[in-house]
Amino acid sequence: MAERDYYEVLGVARDASDADLKKSYRRLAMKYHPDRNPDDETAIEKFKEAKEAFEILKDPQKRATYDQFGHAGVNQQAGGGGFGGADVNDIFGDVFGDIFGGGRGRGGPRVYRGDDLQYNLEIGLEEAVAGTTTEIKLPASVACEPCDGSGAKRGTSPSSCPTCKGVGQVRMQQGFFSVQQTCPACRGKGKVITDPCPKCRGHGRTNKEKKLSVKIPAGVDTGDKIRLSGEGEASDSGGPPGDLYVAIQVKPHDIFSRDNADLLCTVPINFATATVGGELEVPTLDGRVKLKIPAGTQTEKVFRLRSKGVKPVRGGPVGDLLCKVRVETPVNLSSEQRELLMKFHETISGDNAQKHSPQAHSWLGGVKKFFDDLRS
């Protein structure tokens, strides 16, 4: 294969940082690794080419020599074949060892953190706005008490895995190079249990219901999550437990709805109040307040009550309460009421329509013009 510029091989600029070199090499190595491209000679060559370029450019001294003399200055150092006599696992190390079983396992088997869990908690709007403390119950996987999480029967202990010799990794030879993988016998733990604990049957964990007190901060909303550190799934490899995330779901309210920091409500008023004005009592989460309705109020009119909304959990000013008025048409009228209403209607109709019902008069004028245009 013709020698290509190492910077071109990795697809980086000549002033690329070490982090850029590593990132580019990782991408190419994952793409062209022989395990992912079996029997593809072109991919193997590209893999070797990328490895050779990275080995030279990651070393400051070799890189300086290459920048000054090109391939002639580093061919002897590169070993001609691209691997320089090194073990492929030593080359990859922390670059992309996680592709093949989570790393090299130097110094012993890998220890993994337990899984994170999520608990969906439904609360009322009042609790979400004011904050509260509540108790939740959930099934949990915890370390087995009789065996203290080891999985081995009391008085015994796990023994070293004979397949991987306690390392948790095994070396697999594939052609001209080798790759380390998670040991299939112990699944990376480095230990095997010959006499399992009768309670957990060798798993090292048991299921039990646990109770937790959760503090809900004021101002939370649907979609917010509260993290309880260390309250997640127990680790099965001796690592720390995961975390528990309490996901908040606010229940619909009979009166209020929420829009970020603002509260919204619909206030029905009767025809007479909307016409001549008046004063209403409206609810807030702090109690009742007076709302003044001016004469001639139309339906869908919105009144804003300042600072009667929600204090956001992440900070910021308190929201407002927005009261939208809905004028209610009278129903179930008596004969007397109907007669009075008809007399009233006569007084605001005809020549007085524009004065008393400007919106209706304007709309009727628009309708008349529309039909006139159609006929013309």
Image: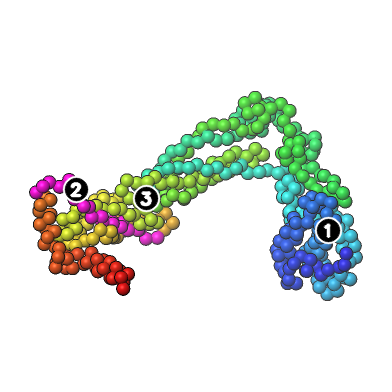
| Separation of residues labelled 2 and 1 (CA atoms) | 84 Å
Q: Quadrant of the C terminus?
A: bottom left
Dot 2 or dot 1, earlier in sequence: 1
Residue 328 belongs to magenta span: yes
Q: Which amino acid type is shown beneath numbered disc 1? A: Thr
Residue 123: give its label. Answer: none
Residue drawn where x is 23% and y is 55% of the image: 327
Q: Which residues are magenta?
A: 316-336
Would you name the residue on which mark 2 appears? 331
In the picture, measured across the screen, residue 373 lies left or right of residue 33, that is left
Would you name the residue on which mark 3 appears? 129
Residue 296 placed where, x, y %? Answer: 19, 62
Would you name the residue on which mark 1 appears? 42
Helix, strand or loop status at disc 2? loop
Q: Which amino acid type is shown beneath numbered disc 2? A: Val
Residue 67 falls in which quadrant of the image?
Answer: bottom right
With respect to residue 141, does 68 lie above or below? below
